[in-house]
Image (cartoon, rainbow, N blue to C red):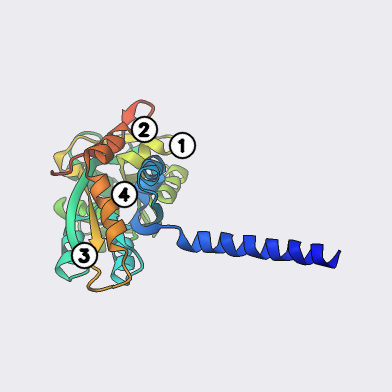
């Protein structure tokens, strides 16, 4: 009896050690990315395809672009997948990234009340923002140093609106990701700048709809960068590069193009080969 118990205990211990070893040996990379790629459902579509082909798990940390780049600066990611070209180029100039490759694009849209109290509707983002400010209509900002937030600030500046002087109770800084910010806008019946992908996958729309779209200024490019192993030697260079090579390959680009919600394509591949 004692011998049998000892045998079972030994067997269980061996099984536990094997499971622990297997978990420890699991190949994975960490990708710091944006809330738009995560909350739109794109990664949920893409990653299983990549993982099946290459046996490498991808752990995504979804943040605003500024925070995603800061995470990579600290060496806490192997790859960055974001959408603020100026910030991405600065990241590389500082020596934190190896090379920036363009992957895909979509566009920004201004979401707002269907009644459009500010009369902002149309194809001109700058005129739309000017009208929102003049009307002091409720406007929700992500306020989180994300790519979307950076774009919003550029548009206000180009529209000639000095936010520091003009923003008041009508302008709500949330410091949140795209989904939570859209929830705030829906609850306030407010205007907000959003990426089209997250908007298309967003369910809690309330009385909101697209108010401004189609302006060439609303183009939204995404890039992917390997974190520089010369800065952080623990970066998984080979596996990180495999992910980058796949996402810009014909197979990866097709997977991006194939992702649709309600028959509508959310992202458009444009990697350069």
Q: Nearer the viewer, residue 222 or 2?
A: 2
Q: CA distance from mark 3 to mark 1?
A: 36 Å
Check residue 114 in the rendering and tell me which mark sits there, or answer none. 2
In the depicted structure, whether residue 24 falls above or below residue 128: below
Check residue 97 in the rendering and tell me which mark sits there, or answer none. 3
Tell which tag, 4 or 1, sits nearer the viewer.
1
Q: Position of residue 9 (x, y in %)?
A: 74, 65
Q: Position of residue 13 (x, y in %)?
A: 67, 65
Q: CA distance from mark 3 to mark 4?
A: 41 Å
Disc 4 element: loop
Task: Name the residue at 37% across, 40% down.
Answer: 49
**Residue designated by label 4:** 136
Tell which tag, 3 or 1, sits nearer the viewer.
3
The answer to whether residue 3 is seen in the rendering is: yes
Q: CA distance from mark 2 to mark 1?
A: 16 Å
Which mark is first along the chain, 1 or 3? 3
**Residue designated by label 1:** 203
The answer to which quarter of the image holds residue 207 is top left
Q: Is residue 207 left or right of residue 272?
A: right
Which mark is first along the chain, 3 or 2? 3
């Amino acid at each position: 009896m004692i011998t049998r118990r000892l045998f079972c205990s030994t067997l269980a211990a061996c099984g536990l050690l094997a499971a622990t070893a297997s978990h420890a040996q699991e190949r994975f990379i960490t990708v710091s990315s944006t809330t738009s790629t995560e909350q739109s459902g794109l990664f949920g579509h893409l990653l299983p395809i990549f993982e099946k082909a290459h046996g490498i798990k991808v752990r995504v940390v979804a943040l605003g672009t500024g925070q995603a780049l800061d995470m990579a600066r600290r060496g806490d990611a192997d790859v960055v997948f974001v959408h603020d070209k100026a910030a991405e180029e600065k990241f590389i100039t500082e020596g934190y990234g190896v090379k920036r490759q363009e992957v895909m694009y979509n566009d920004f849209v201004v979401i707002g009340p269907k009644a459009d109290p500010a009369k902002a509707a149309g194809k001109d983002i700058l005129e739309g923002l000017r009208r929102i400010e003049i009307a002091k209509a409720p406007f929700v900002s992500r306020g989180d140093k994300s790519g979307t937030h950076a774009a919003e600030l550029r548009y206000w500046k180009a529209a000639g609106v000095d936010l520091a002087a003009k923003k008041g109770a009508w302008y709500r800084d949330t410091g949140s990701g795209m989904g939570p910010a859209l929830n705030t806008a829906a609850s306030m019946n407010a205007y907000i700048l959003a990426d089209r992908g997250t908007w298309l996958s967003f369910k809690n729309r309330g009385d909101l709809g697209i108010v401004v779209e189609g302006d060439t200024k609303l183009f939204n490019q995404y890039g992917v960068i390997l974190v520089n192993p010369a800065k952080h030697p623990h970066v998984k260079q080979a596996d990180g590069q495999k992910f980058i090579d796949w996402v810009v390959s014909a197979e990866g680009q097709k997977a991006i193009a194939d992702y649709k919600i309600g028959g509508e394509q959310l992202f458009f591949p444009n990697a350069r080969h």
